[in-house]
Image (tube, coloured by chain):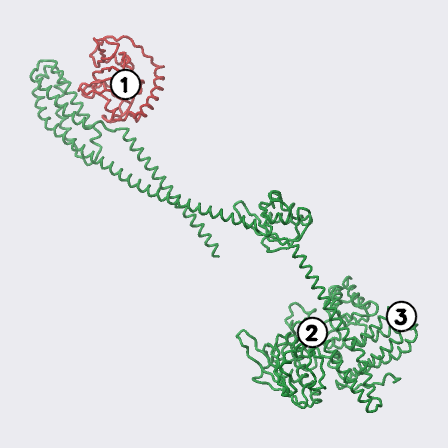
Amino acid sequence: MYLTDKFMRGALVASAVAFGALAPHSAAALDAPVGPVVLSVKGNITETNNGDQADFDTAMLEALGIKEFQTTTIWTEGTKTFEGPTLRAILEAVGAKSDNIRAVALNDYAIEMAAPAEDYPGPVIALRMDGNAMPVRNKGPLWLVYPYDSDPAFRTEVVYANSIWQLRNIEVQED
Amino acid sequence: MLPVRSVHRKTYLKGARIAVVATALAVAFGVILALSVNVFEKQKRLQTANSDSVIWTLSQLEVEFLRYSSALHEALLQPEDAATLANLRQKFDIFFSRVTTVENATALRTNVGTESVDGYFKDIRAVLTAAIPLIDANDTVLAAGLPDLMDGYRTLSPVVREVSLKNLQNFTQISTAARYNVLHTMQVLGVVTFAMIIVLVALSFALFRLAAVNERNANKQRSLAARVQTILDTALDAVLVVDRDGNVQEFNGAATAIFGYQPEEAIGANLRDLIIPEEYRRGHDIGMERMRRTGETRLIGGGRIEIEALRKDGTTFPVELSIETAHTPQGDVYVSFIRDISARKAAEAEIVEARDRALAGERTKSRFLAVMSHEMRTPLNGLLGMLDLIRHTRMDEKQSFYVQNMEYSGRVLMDLINNVLDLTKLETEVEALNISSFDPPGLVQEVLASLLGLARKNENDLSFDWVGNPVPGIKTDRARLRQVLLNLVNNAIKFTKNGEVIVEAEIHEPVTPAGQPELELRVIDSGCGIAAEDQKRIFDDFETIDDTYDRNVEGSGLGLGIVRRLVQMIRGSIGVTSEPGEGSMFWVRIPIRIEAAEDSFEAPVVLPQKGKALNLLMVEDNMINRRVLREMLESAGHTVSEAHDGMQGVEAANATAFDAILMDISMPGMDGVAATRAIRSGTGPNKMTPIIAATAHALPEEIETFTEAGMNDVLSKPIIRAELNKILHYWTADEDDDDADIDFSEGEKEDGDNSFLAALARDLPPEEMRALVERFVTETDRAFDALVPLAQSEENRKEVTSIVHKTAGSAGSFGLDELHAALAEAQTQLKTNPDYNMPEGVAELSQAWLGARVEITMMMLGYGINLELEPWPLSA
């Protein structure tokens, strides 16, 4: 596991360099959400727009930069196209001081994970599946997904457990 | 054959073993690979989970259903609270989402044989789908529809429970199957691992054994090498190992001792420069080159070879050498054992020299004996002749008695000399057996007949008795057997007075199956007998028994010695039993072969023609000889050309091709040897024709001269017809002549000195014989008549020499050896010795002729021919 992670990290470093050159991020101060809030991030963060937490509507997430990839999942049938910002983009947007996060779903499913230091390919907070926004009835509106097909490292029980759907809150932990 | 096969078998076994080991290794490797792949696969499968946590998913279905249920109940209590309704909507959606998730859960659907839960989900989905319009509607409609949702909820409740249980059941089944699957894999793994361990153990064992065998072999190899080294070091012979290029690889201590090189000097150097003498190097190079090119070896494997070798100090010495090829993995090497044989060679040379000296001494002795006997016979013949003449003169009784005694003594002396001659002849002749077929009774009768006169003189009865079944004929050396019998019967008659001599013959069957039948001849007399103590030594040379028994018995003491030698020659045995006063029995047993009779002695005197007719050249200066030889040759069907001396012979040989040439040796002018050389070295048609020497006196060294000159064979004079035919046939017969074994035995060599006269008597009609001999005698008489006055003056020396030569020729051809020898000697003296007393010499020759003349006269009487001669010398 450890070895695979390390390998994966190596691959991610290479990708991060590539993407970093194409779409540099600006950690601008967060605007207040206009539409319904779909994601709230709190905890060990610097950027907030609602008290000690950072609320995001769909438009704000779209603005973080959309990654699009195709993959199969063990929960769906056939190859699906997912679109959304990366977890890393969100953490940077909120000025997360730690990679350790706790993510909680609408159904109170919660996980704790260390967000990978590198950007895509890594967990993406999908907004759309096959071009359509996802309703709660279909694991929406946000689904933390990995490009499972791209790497066997993404087909482990930990990764599956981390693939939290109906994601609503993220709490960045202390180190 | 066997070792080769075992070697093959060994190789085969070795190959099989290697194959087994290789296969085992391959199998082990394969299994390890398969296991690794399997394990890797397993690991990969562990790394990539194909399902979410099933238990969680299952429990979440009911959990989320219950949350929906509580939200629904809450909404029923507060239908107008928007937040409650929103919560209901959310819980509905979450539950809806979960249903989809659980329905699609691959972990619960992959296995065949599980109970399908599709029906339940269909029911659940139907209820949920029916609820969607209400959930998605505004709060008022939703609030109004809450009772409907409650109904739906009540419908769903047992189904959700049921599907959860079913799923759990299915999952248990799947887990069990998966566990069994894992267990099975583990079992297979275990079995395979165990098998692999066995294979590995077997392999280890095999390797261990292989190592042990290798160790043993290595030890064996080491001790073998040590042994070989010891053998090499202690070998008395030089041992050199060289490679294909002749470079020395091994050089042992003995080699150092023999050749003088230290091993470090020799090893690596080339054999050629080391030990091969200069003059053999070229040959060595050619041999090596040939071996490299064609693989042909001449010295190698050829056993022991004697050759010259070179020492470090440059001296050469003889060695004995044997080389063998040894096949090594690094290519062939040649192992040579070399022995210094200088000492042996020197010893051999010494022995050879000693032997040569001894042989020369022996030859000198024999020749001396022969010459002395000859020399003694000549004057003795003269003496006897004179005595004979005296007897015919008028004498008183006393004188007559003296003469008789003198004559008797002379005859004894003559007998003695003859025996010595016979013995010398036997000693020097190593003649092969002359086997012929004949009828044994015929032979005995013949011998008895020839001794009838002697028997009568001693008043003995002679008889012959064949014991047992007669045989048609036997095969053995007839001439020798005849002489044995002749001597034995002669002896018996001599020692028997007024008694009887019986010859018995008997055939003995072979004692062993492989043996030969034997002919036993017994000569039994009623004579004086031999004392027991004498019986052993009588067969020794020069042994005579004290002749007090009978003074009249004459003997040289050589007769039985000769008989013993003859019997040994024909591989027989001889013995005697005797009782003094009663008589003796001599027995002879000889191995024979029983054959159909074809006793040639019984055949008519007229010779059948044998062999093919030949065209011959006869080179002979003596008229009488020519006459006799021509008669012999023509009667055999040959054509004869004559040449009267060597020069004529060479001319004739250059002009015409002959089948063979008969060449006299001593001729005036060019002699036979010179003529032969001329013919051989010339270009005439007879360059390759067989040339046969005809000579009366051929000593071994002379025969060498003849052969050297190019003569093929030697005929002894007087020429015997059978001998002549045999030699001619031998030298002229075609290779494929199927009558190659023609029997020329007729006319066996007679005993006695005048065998030539005997041969003449047989070959010529009596009248011709008489004419020939009379003419010879008359001519010789005339020659001496002429010689005596001529010899008085030295002026006539040349004429005397010529007459002497001519007479010598005639005497030679008549077998008058003594006369011939005397004349030949005189001739030599006349030619070479100016002080030679001619008158005296001629007087001596006249005496010799007188003796010979008497001899001839008596011989002819013996053949029933009474010569009509004028008395000679006229002066007597």
Q: Nearer the viewer, residue A167 or B790?
A: B790
For label 1, the SS is loop
Residue identified by numbered label 3 = B835
Which amino acid does the dot numbered 3 rest on? Asp
- Chain letter of mark 2 equals B
Q: Callout 3: helix, strand or loop? A: loop
* Pointers 2 and 1 within a single chain: no
Which residue in the protein does label 1 denote? A115
| Picture coordinates of residue B106, whole percent (x, y) | 22, 29
Give the spatial CA distance, label 2 vs label 1. Answer: 135 Å
Quarter of the picture containing the C terminus of chain B is bottom right
Q: How far across and how far down the image is residue B682, in percent? A: 78, 62
**Residue B249 seen anywhere in this rendered image of the structure:** yes
Provide the residue designation for mark 2.
Answer: B426
Q: Is residue B83 above or below residue B710?
A: above
**Res B530 → quadrant:** bottom right
Element assignment for label 2: helix
CB atoms of marks 2 and 3 within 8 Å: no
Q: Decide which of A55, B339 is in the foreground and name it.
A: B339
Tell me residue B787's x, y (percent): 88, 77
Colour chain A is painted in: red
Q: Are marks 3 and 1 in contact (CB under 8 Å)?
A: no
Label 3 chain ID = B
Please say whether residue B18 is visible from this viewpoint: no
Chain assigned green: B
In the image: residue A139, left or right of residue B484: left
Considering every residue shown, the one lying at the far bottom of the view is B397
Q: Are marks 2 and 3 on the same chain?
A: yes
